[in-house]
Amino acid sequence: MLMRATSPSVASKSPAKSLKSSAKSPTWPPAGPDPIVLMGAATAFGRNAEIYGEGQPADHLYKVVSGTVRTAKILSDGRRQIGAFYLPGDMFGFDHGAERAFSAEAIGEASILVIERATLIALAVHDTTVARELWTLTARELARVQRHVLLLVKTAQARVSGFLLEMAERGAAGDTLALPMLRQDIADYLGLTIETVSRTLSGLEADGMIELIGSRGVVLRKPALLGRLAA
Amino acid sequence: MLMRATSPSVASKSPAKSLKSSAKSPTWPPAGPDPIVLMGAATAFGRNAEIYGEGQPADHLYKVVSGTVRTAKILSDGRRQIGAFYLPGDMFGFDHGAERAFSAEAIGEASILVIERATLIALAVHDTTVARELWTLTARELARVQRHVLLLVKTAQARVSGFLLEMAERGAAGDTLALPMLRQDIADYLGLTIETVSRTLSGLEADGMIELIGSRGVVLRKPALLGRLAA
DNA sequence: CGTGCAGTTGAGCAAATTCAACGCTTGTGG
DNA sequence: CCACAAGCGTTGAATTTGCTCAACTGCACG
């Protein structure tokens, strides 16, 4: 391995323009009543702005109102591993322990609901629904990371195919999807190099599996076959 | 990739000899009071016996009393991915949703405390401590899987070194550790082949980093340097 | 003492990385 | 408005890592 060092990603820190807009929240697909989203303040983050840093105390939870968030960790050899992408409606920040294992950054402009962990815990003591929701969300995150593990032991083609399908069923605009992140982000999520990601996407297009619209748009031409490739 | 199909691992199903022994449980390192372990029945499992299967309903939680447990998933290409190893004192089975994503099997003889999920949830409604513990344990599992992700994007040498250190700090008998699992299990956990695991261990021994005692024993000769290799 | 399983070691090969060059788009300043 | 620089993405060629195939060793068990 020993791949090239990842581009520094100089966070252009524009932390908190504190726009209190949009107290109405987009509801979660299969969710019941969601008392959690009724609180917290929506905050705007700019491109590559850091929401929280590795090693910082984990005393807030977050919900994406708009935009996309990535969690990342810089490895000792300079590479970067992306832990997850969070789309509008997703909650994140469920780290255990005092310190963040990954940092979180906005990809492009994003509006994020910031919620104090202590507030939620205090609520959970009296409200079983909140307690249960915190547990459920953490378990869901656990399942997501386990699927990530499964992605990482496959071939480059299977990883990229799996990634496209994952984004498709989350972004969900038919078979056309817009990838909000750069090739480098995809590569760091999949444990590949940008060259391999690029080549693999080109290969899939050459095989008629997908169609690339610019560098952000992808049309899944044969989702079923793509599913086979994802193994 | 496309590595060799993993050995079938014919589970010699000896599910429940129901030995009600040892209601006293080994306490967890940094744990507070642990009301969870006071319930449930200790059950004996034989070598490779299945504790639960992929796709089965996730309606129990488990605590290892003695022995070692692995969770595994068979991939569509025949390979097997190990999700985790659980040592005495560890709890497992925190899957989200109705179905198990991985199966769980005993490695060698094991005694497992089996706890009904519904019982715990009913308890948690009235006892905040239980509710909190369930959440904490799930979050801890999440952190473990995230570290697993980090292992899988490294070189073979780094993966094996990291694995040895992980086992060392959990098994914790100084710098000497006994690996309860086969090479195939280690390989499937690390996303490598048994040949690569074997070669890497031999290489580490040749470099004086470790000493191999038979095929199960390992002495960490230079843990600090090994930590460097694990990157 | 033979059989089977676990583990090790060797040689060749394939997949993904590294190194390098080039093209496209965007934004900026003259 | 154009020139140019910078960032992002793609493509090509050489290299490296870890896999595949295969042989062989040690050990336990009947």
Image (cartoon, coloured by chain):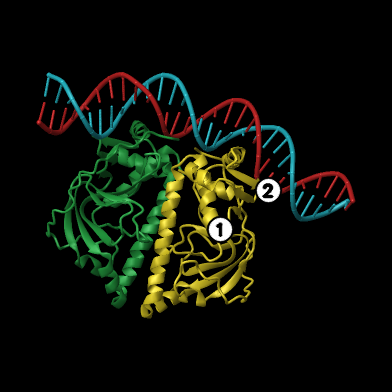
Chain colours: A yellow, B green, C cyan, D red
In the structure shown, which secondary structural element does the residue marked by tag 1 occupy? loop
Q: Nearer the viewer, residue B137 or B177?
A: B137
Q: Are marks 2 and 1 on the same chain?
A: yes
Q: Position of residue A169 (x, y in %)?
A: 52, 56
Pinpoint the chain carrying mark 1.
Answer: A
| Residue of label 2 | A214
A199 w.r.t. B105: above or below? above
At 58% from the left edge and 53% from the top edge, which residue is drawn? Answer: A175
Whether residue A120 is visible: yes
Q: Nearer the viewer, residue A153 or A18?
A: A153
Q: Nearer the viewer, residue B93 or B63?
A: B93
| Residue of label 1 | A172
Pinpoint the chain carrying mark 2.
Answer: A
Q: Position of residue B67 (x, y in %)?
A: 21, 50
The mark total stands at 2
Label 2: few (<14), some (14–19) or many (≥20) C-alpha neighbours in 10 Å = few
Q: What is the spatial separation of the Cα atoms under label 2 and label 1, in whole angstroms?
A: 19 Å
In the structure shown, which secondary structural element does the residue marked by tag 2 occupy? loop
A203 w.r.t. A46: above or below? above
